[in-house]
Amino acid sequence: MVKNPLKAHIPDSVFEFLVKNNLIKEKGVRDFKIRQRFNTLRREHSTQRAIELIQQEYPYLQYETIRKIIYQKVKLHSPEYFYLF
């Protein structure tokens, strides 16, 4: 089972349920982790250096791709989106 990278936000059981039922996107979790890492690195490094460090952690992503992930606006869905019935 995949380790819960969102432990601070959702319990392991919920994360396991979401993964098991294919209700969570791997890319979305990755992007969330990249944004969190960027915010942490920015406390001690310049923006460019922070992105370079992230690029070392995710070598398959280009600099520009990481920049887009960091600066993309997070879309919030309206409450009716979450109703299951």
Image: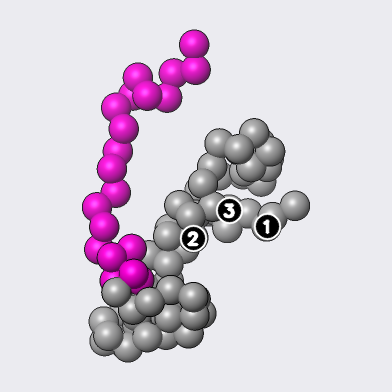
**In the image: residue 66, left or right of residue 17:** left
- First in sequence, mark 2 or 1: give its number: 1
Neighbourhood count class around disc 3 (C-alpha, 10 Å): few under 14, some 14–19, many 20 upward:
few
Looking at the image, is mark 2 or mark 1 nearer the viewer? Answer: 2
Question: Judging from the image, what secondary structure is the residue with disc 3 in?
Answer: loop
User: Dividing the picture into quarters, in which one does residue 70 lie?
Assistant: bottom left
Name the residue at 29% across, 27% down: 78
Q: Is residue 79 magenta?
A: yes
Q: Residue at x 54, y 52 (%)?
A: 26
Which residue appears farthest toward the top when viewing the image?
85
Position of 36 compared to 8: left or right? Answer: left
Q: Dots 2 and 1: beta carbons under 8 Å?
A: no
Q: Which residue is mark 2?
A: 30
Question: What amino acid is found at the position of numbered circle 3 in the picture?
Answer: Lys
Residue 3 numbered tag: 1
Mark 2 or 3 closer to N-term? Answer: 3
Q: Which residues are magenta?
A: 65-85
Residue density around tag 2, few if under 14, some if 14–19, many if 20 or more, within 10 Å: some
Q: Tell whether position 41 is magenta.
A: no
Q: Is residue 28 left or right of residue 22?
A: left
Query: What amino acid is labelled 2 in the image?
Result: Arg
Residue to which mark 3 is pinned: 7
Q: Secondary structure at mark 1?
A: loop
Res 77 → quadrant? top left
The image shows residue 16 at horizontal and vertical percentages of 68, 42
Q: Nearer the viewer, mark 1 or mark 3?
A: 1
Tell me the CA gap for discs 1 and 3. Answer: 9 Å
Residue 14 in view: no
